[in-house]
Image (cartoon, rainbow, N blue to C red):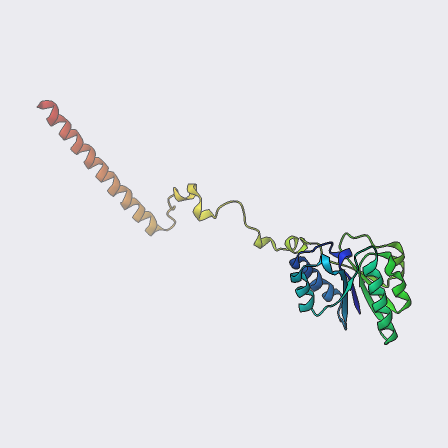
Amino acid sequence: MVLLDLENVIGSNPRPEAVDKCLSAVLELAAPVAVCWAAYPQRLLSERAREVLKRHGVKTQWAKAGNNSADRALLKLARKEADKGRRRFVIVSGDADFAPLADLGTLEVIARYEQKVGSRLRRRASRIHRLPEPDSAARRAPASAVRSADPPAEQRPEDAQRLPIPRTPGQVAVAGLALWAAGTCFGAGMATGAWVARRVLRA
């Protein structure tokens, strides 16, 4: 049985996306899950967030606003399930008030990655799971997924100005002919220009 103290693990007025991400991680850590209950003051949970709970198959026990009201509601549900023979309890909270769940059977805890777990709860839990850090997936991204700040070699301006270096005898011959043709054209152009200049000066 999974017991979700939503306000303790997610906070007040959580975004539906945050609820969805939290529930996905919780149900994976707690598997196999026979039944899952969440307690939360109804006025502090949006309609969209409630739809997320329903989509994940989470049953909801609305608690009154006030200190420890959700805790008491979840403990009451756990005792009812224990009377039916339930012996595994996974509490999603760091609140030490849930330590008595260990008297009902095996107690496991799921808490946020940086959340402090009450000392009494920590001592009595058989196992403590931690939800993943929000950016852990980004840190696990392979190096190939990180783009270099430099542009690809073929796009670099300095590379665009470079001429290919001849490698084979055929390439050398072609390059030589190209240079000879360029030189011939250049020389012819210079001679023509000089002839024109002389004719102008004579006139």
Q: Which percent across, then down, holds residue 165? A: 38, 46
User: Furthest-bottom residue in view?
Assistant: 84
Q: Looking at this rendering, what residue extends furthest in the left direction?
A: 203
Residue 67, placed above or below residue 179 = below
Q: Is residue 26 left or right of residue 126?
A: left
From the top left corner, tell me how far across and down residue 89 is, in percent: 83, 67
Viewer-closest of 65 and 116: 65
- Residue 42 placement: quadrant: bottom right
Q: Position of residue 112 (x, y in %)?
A: 76, 55
Residue that appears at 43% across and 41% down: 158
Residue at left offset 81%, top offset 63%: 91
Q: Is residue 118 left or right of residue 142?
A: right
Q: Kindly tell me whether residue 97 is visible in this rendering.
A: yes
User: What is the quadrant of residue 4 in the picture?
Assistant: bottom right
Q: Is residue 137 above or below residue 103?
A: above
Q: Position of residue 199 (x, y in %)?
A: 10, 27
| Residue 101 lies in quadrant | bottom right
Q: Residue at x 9, y 23 (%)?
A: 202
Could you tell me which quadrant the C terminus lies in?
Answer: top left
The image shows a total of numbered marks equal to 0
**180 and 186: which one is in front?**
186
Give the side of residue 56 with respect to residue 63, left or right.
Answer: left
